[in-house]
Image (tube, coloured by chain):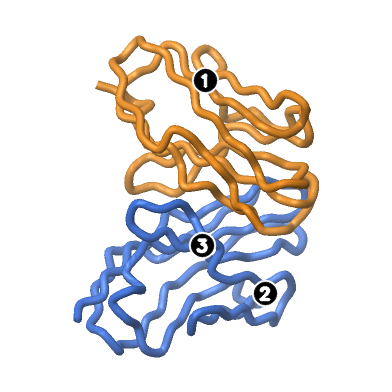
Chain colours: A blue, B orange
Amino acid sequence: GNSVTQMEGPVTLSEEAFLTINCTYTATGYPSLFWYVQYPGEGLQLLLKATKADDKGSNKGFEATYRKETTSFHLEKGSVQVSDSAVYFCALRGGGYKLSFGAGTTVTVRA
Amino acid sequence: EAGVAQSPRYKIIEKRQSVAFWCNPISGHATLYWYQQILGQGPKLLIQFQNNGVVDDSQLPKDRFSAERLKGVDSTLKIQPAKLEDSAVYLCASSLDGSRGRAPLHFGNGTRLTVT
């Protein structure tokens, strides 16, 4: 079946630092890939998505590129803000399977 | 567009009591999901409906959990009797496409359940 493995946290950064959260996946066929974000006390929000190989998803300064050759979908942001403090989940969906999540990475940005 | 609505936001019950959660998906979304998110873990699918039919309930503890989606719109998830390990956030989500689709899911804010 499908599965997602993402970098374990927690990750603590200073404001304006570069953020990378690694995500790799195992899947049959050609799944869609997603990053969801969960701010404190809130539900999951879709951050960005990519539906085919070499697609780049982007939103709010975050980017991730669907790399089929390395089965990866790493999340990056060039300059983080305190408001980016949240839990980030990598997820995939496709081939008739349910949306499968990674364990989540907690990111804390200090002023 | 209105999002996925869930209620209540918080619930505290004693073990062996029963509890019910309610979800109203985004209008027009055929597929509805219930996820359980235990603290520090990623969400785990409990049950998936397409319209009012169950597509996947393989991870639902059927001896104590039940769910229904009458008329293919709103859904309720019930736990009876609750155990301490049921303490979690219960997330409802919906998607526009069917169960074999690849579109993103839209989540509600969840119900935080504490079992004492």
Q: Position of residue B98 (x, y in %)?
A: 80, 46
| Left or right, residue A87 beside residue B56 | left
> On the image, numbered disc 2 is attached to which residue?
A68
Marked residue chain, label 3: A
Circle 1: element type: strand
Amino acid type of disc 2? Lys
Q: Quadrant of residue B88?
A: top left
Marked residue chain, label 2: A
Circle 3: element type: strand
In this view, the mark in front (1 or 3) = 1
In this view, the mark in front (1 or 2) = 1
Q: Residue at x 73, y 42 (%)?
A: B31
| Left or right, residue B33 beside residue A81 | right
Circle 2: element type: loop
Q: Residue at x 58, y 35 (%)?
A: B23
Amino acid type of disc 1? Lys
Compared with B17, B98 (above or below) is below
Front residue of this view, candidates A15 and B40: A15
Q: Position of residue B102 (x, y in %)?
A: 74, 57
Q: Position of residue A31 (x, y in %)?
A: 71, 61
> On the image, numbered disc 3 is attached to which residue?
A36
Q: Residue furthest left?
A: A111
